[in-house]
Amino acid sequence: MLGSGGVTVMEEGTDMVWAALRLMEFFYHESCGKCSPCREGSSWLVQTMRRIVAKRGQMEDLETLVHLCKNIEGRTVCAFGDASVAPIMSTLKHWRPEYVALIQAAEAANLIKLEPAAARH
Amino acid sequence: MLKEKYKDEIDSILSRYPVKRSALIPLLYLAQRDEGFVSEAAMKEIAGLLRLTPPQVYETATFYTMLNLKRVGKFHLQVCKSLMCALAGSDTVIGWVKTKLGIGPGETTADGLFTLSAVECLAACGTAPMMQVNEDYYERLTEERFDRVLADLKRDGTCQLKTGPFMWPLPAPPAR
Amino acid sequence: MATTTTETVRLTIDGIPISVPKGTLVIEAARRVGVMVPHFCYHPKLKPDANCRMCLVEVEKMPKLQTSCSTLATEGMAVRTATTVVHDAHKSVLEFILANHPLDCPVCDQGGKCDLQDFSHEYTATSRFIETKRIFQKEYFSPLIETQMNRCVQCLRCVRYCDEVMDVKALAPVGRGTMTEIKSFGAHPLDCEFCGGCVQICPVGAITSRLSMYEYRPWMLKRADTVCTFCGDGCQITVQTKDQELIEVNSAQGAGRNSGDLCARGFFGFHAASHPSRVTHPLIRRNGVLVEATWEEALEFVAEQTNRLKLAHGPHAFGGLITGRCTNEELYLFQKFMRLTIGTNNLDSSARYGHVNGVQAMRMVQGTHRWTVTFEDIVQADVLLLVGTNITEANPITGLKVKEAVKKHGATLLTIEAIQAAVGTISNISNLSEQHFCVAPSQFGAAVLGLLKAVVESNYVDSAISQRASDYVLAVSQAVQQLTWNDLALDTGISRESFVQMAAALTGGRRVVALAGQTLLRSQGSYGICLNLLDLLLLTGKLTAQGCGFAPLAEENNDQGAVEMGAVAALLPGALDLTDQDARTQIARVWKEDLPLAAGATLIEMIDRAQAGIIKGLFVIGENPVGSLPPQIGAKEALGKLDLLVCQELFLTETAELAHVVLPAASAMEKAGTFTNTEGHVQAVRPAIDPVGDSRPDWEILSAISVFMGAPLEYSEAKEILKEIRAVIPGYGSLGPSPIPPAVDRVAVDRYVNEGYRQDLTTRYTLPARAMRPEGTVQLGLVQSLFHSGKLSTHSKGLLQIEPSGFLQMNPVDAARFGLETGDRVRLSNGRGEFTTTAKVFDRVPEGLAWFPDHFAQAALRLFDCAVDPDTKVPYCRTASVSVMKTT
């Protein structure tokens, strides 16, 4: 289950993490911002996903992603929040090795130089 | 002033809704059609027409991305970048825009003709990749079709390849 | 309509059983058993929005966690707030809310009183957020209100408050998703009522006051709960100070008659007391110049001169004026000083400017000097009639009660106001009206007569009153039959059908409250119009019914107290007639001395007598007749002739500049006592700071003068005076959480319908002169601004930021007629003089009228004439016909 009930046929070899990010980008854009878990969660998820796809992820991110998804699910005003976590939850379940590969690539390249999260003002 | 220019149309929009405020989005579209974007003056005027405060109009106008709050080019290219189009090559379409017109998302050509926006799903997944130019859809884009759209738009202001949008109510058939 | 259900439901919260009224939210039920469910977006004043998701709780038999702020308590419900599941949910939602929140507590003014900070401590929140935080670019700075949108948690309390409570709608959530920002319009600074509601209701530091920016931490401040002095509503304010410096004012949610709501004056106007131009030392005129003196010198001078004049010319050569901003204790002591120490009834207060009209009308018809209703009755009314109130500006918090009745409970609002319905930057009560008559102040009387005629002709007269007082009903019926619908339509522009429609709505109401406001009370003929309004209620059976009544709104914070303390010429403490023998006996027993019987002079009469050389000495406490009355009255010349003018003042006003002695008085921020608000509720005033400079409370000054005169009225503190007030007026002041209103006095009503009405019925039921408006002229009206109160607020730096000066406010149609645009210079003139100012086009001003704020009107006063009410001696000087000319 990747989201909104449609059937999508993808070519073998499609980067599923990238696909999940594209879907997450859509949900992030569509989140109206009324309730906190969906508003903040979608922006958080999309940022983490972008980092992983850009090969700047770390192993802890995978656990965080799952937690965030679970914390959004069932706690929002409408069902959009529930739907928005489906792409990440499903891809993590079925294509976890793709995530791991991206992170291992990141670790190998020693690119993890995360900036502290403090606000810039 | 919209009121003077589109009196009949505004009256007809207002007559469609039992609650005045409901006419907000149609009126914002009207304003956008008039100037190409929704200006502050238009938002204030619409607020007056609907007995709302300008912040209430601004709230709605900023929520919907199909309403432009800044001036855009004569042709607003909105390329879908959601998953289905992305699988079918929307990044390539954005690349064509960059090479052929020299603009990236959010930019406008120097001649003021084209503005590019990368947008989320426009509900034409079956005919991806696609883009919307102003009110019209151009689907199953190939480089050849894309070039023709640009050329036609530049020359004629429109292009025969357009396929939509299919909105309700359907436009009345031309009178015989 | 108000729903007062007694049905209850039983439920358990964490195993604790509780029974609550049906319709109670789970979060409120939990609060009742002492369980605080964490929340951001929930607020008792607002409709549930359930957007922050912080208040999730477990409810038995429900599959998912529920938001307790939007779930109604139902019979047999079992709620659990302290389970691991709930705790984890709270912690996770908090983690989301904190994700984009900056860690800037050290520089945030909310630090120490921030819900987010408190909950973070409670849940020992840690964040796994390592992405980039959202940042909003600051595009503008609003006056008085600082917005730091990076701190915003998007609970929308401010937006909802601005709409649901204030009806201003100046704030909106702009954009979408995580980039949602609270803004007004585009990159424009906030332009609104500046009620400070958004500052008070923001749970974090996103919206704060600029007046106290970076000044303090909450625990550094001293607090004093006192009462605001900027109108008659009597709002409770908490004044916060640091080392004798006024830092901030707020009002706790649910506190006082305002239940924590304030207006711009209350929230941002507090700096008036600490203005550098305060008079801080006694001043004595020597060689024509006011020079500093010691208290001993000044008091000795006053006492000596007073005794000398009294010996030479008798007690009636004195007069006294006091402002309704003083405490009850001071008003009481002032009239005692005048009546006992001096020996005259020549005394008056600012209640004379209008409030006396409403009070005397109530005394005449219903035998009370107070409302028979309360703010709660306004909120619960099903029909409200507003006549000449300009309520959202003159009495903003009573205005909130009206808004609550209409917006929350669906009351029918009927308005007769000199305001045009229009959406603007500040709220406009006529936007909420079911039926609105926009008429000029000069035609309020005609509009009320139209309603009376409609009531009579449509047979809406209550059968009980027809039976009980057939003569009275007949007399009124005959009187209204003399009026023609045609004349009424010409005067008011309102058709018979509209009058009948409004009369029907009024008659159909179960709980009807009629409010009369400042615009009416200060317009010519207003005493008669108030009586006619009372007739209207009486005839429709709405005067004596439960929850119904007449409510004239006081302008000054203690105008009602001034009347009740007897600080007006014709009334004794308890608002009893000067000639009332029982009252005189009672007072004489307490005072151990008889009080003078000779009728006293009122405000204008005192000025006339000073002009004629009859009054030679005048005590003026906080009043400024020279600055407030049109020069046509000749107050300046009259006061110039006095042998002794003593002013107790905060500032060197136009009147004080003429004084022989100026005694520095303490402001309400610096003294203790009580104020009586417009609904007759007596509330405690507490000092927030020490008296500025050498200033002293007015009661202390009066007491000191009496001591120096050798006839001491000695009290060690204000409370002792209150004790004496209670001896004179048994049980005065409830000082409880809400007032207990008096009931209509049946005997008085009988007296009125049998006899009283005959006095002036024919005069009252005559149409006022039709407003003539020659080409090129407008009716200029002096009005109350939302951002000012009298002249006092013009010393408040906060309020001056919003409204620094006066503008001629004019309807767009009129403005176009005169070729004027906002910002143009305009000259106003008539036979009495001319005045140049700046124009401002304003939708809410009715066509044919123009407004100028009273607070900046000194130079405009020369355009106005003054008519004095034959019955109540109220000076009417707020409208003038003027020619308008654009100038450069």
Image (spheres, coloured by chain):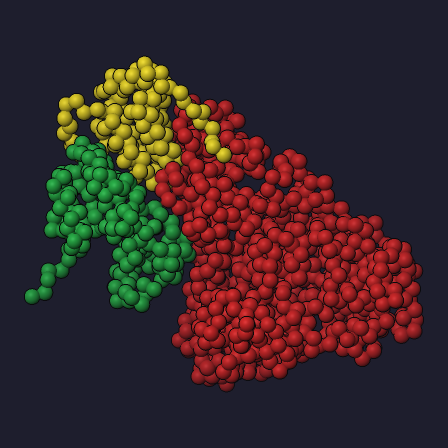
Chain colours: A yellow, B green, C red
* Horizontal arrangement in the rendering, residue C838 relative to residue A96 (left or right): right
Say if residue C495 shows up in the picture: yes
Residue at 79% in and 78% down: C611
Q: Quadrant of residue C509?
A: bottom left
**Is B129 placed above or below C790 here?**
above
Quarter of the image for the C terminus of chain C: give it. Answer: bottom right
Residue at 46% in and 64% down: C430
Residue A68 picture location, percent across and down: 35, 26
* Horizontal arrangement in the rendering, residue C324 relative to residue C129 (left or right): right
Q: Nearer the viewer, residue C400 or A13?
A: A13
Residue C123 picture location, percent across and down: 49, 25
Residue C558 picture location, percent across and down: 68, 59
* Horizontal arrangement in the rendering, residue B155 relative to residue C724 (left or right): left
Say if residue C679 shows up in the picture: no
Q: Residue furthest left?
A: B176
Q: Quadrant of residue C182?
A: top left
Residue at 47% in and 83% down: C487
**Is C215 placed above or below C804 here?**
above
Q: Quadrant of residue A86?
A: top left
Q: Nearer the viewer, residue B15 or C724?
A: B15
**Is C761 placed above or below C61 here?**
below
Q: Residue furthest top?
A: A108
Q: Nearer the viewer, residue C429 or C301?
A: C301
**Is A93 placed above or below C517 here?**
above
